[in-house]
Amino acid sequence: MRLVPAHLRNFVFGVEDSLVSTVGLLSGIAIAGVERETIFLTGVVLVFVEAVSMAAGSFLSEVSAEEYEGGRGVGQRQSLFSGLIMFGSYLIAGFIPIFPYTFLEGTRAFASSIMLSVAALFVLGAWSGVLSRSGLIRGALRMAVVGGVAIAVGVGVGTFIS
């Protein structure tokens, strides 16, 4: 199976969405002073449920687009592979922001989770920038800033509500 733009799109989307969604949720909950075990459990449940949901959404949207462009029953194999890429990238990336909560407490876990996630977004953006020829630094900064703003929303909501 060769790499097609849909595969790259699903990989980047899966990693970015998983990092941002997971760290945003965990940060919002951590700010409320919830126990570390509850934060960890919440993160794991979120990552698995969202990985399956995102994979299903990716498959269905890719199939719909392929059928629209080329007729009935076209591209299901490629669409299935795109869904699998989405599942794997979302699942693996989601454990990056969860990891600090396995061994750190409170604000140290919170800060480490955010820093690891933003660093992973930076690396993803750099890699994406190189592949797309838009530039390593440009891609890295764009991904880190856009993802960082989304993370800040989770932190802000958690702070406001708690």
Image (cartoon, rainbow, N blue to C red):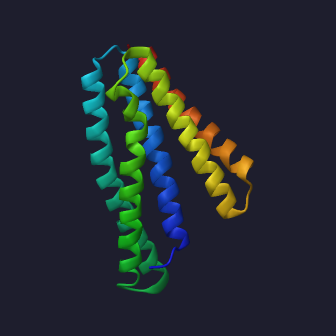
Classify the position of the C terminus by image quarter: top left
Q: Quadrant of residue 144?
A: top right
Q: Position of residue 155 (x, y in %)?
A: 48, 23
Image height of 21 relative to 14, above or below: above
Q: Quadrant of residue 109?
A: top left
Q: Position of residue 22 (x, y in %)?
A: 40, 37
Question: Which residue is at a point 27% across and 47% down the rendered structure image?
Answer: 49
Q: Nearer the viewer, residue 123 or 69?
A: 123
Classify the position of the N terminus by image quarter: bottom left
Left or right: 121 in relation to 11: right
Image height of 48 relative to 103, above or below: below
Question: Which residue is at a point 32% across and 61% down the rendered structure image?
Answer: 56
Q: Position of residue 28 (x, y in %)?
A: 40, 24
Image height of 64 relative to 28, above or below: below
Q: Position of residue 114 (x, y in %)?
A: 50, 29
Question: Which residue is at a point 46% across and 41% down the rendered structure image?
Answer: 19
Left or right: 142 in relation to 105: right
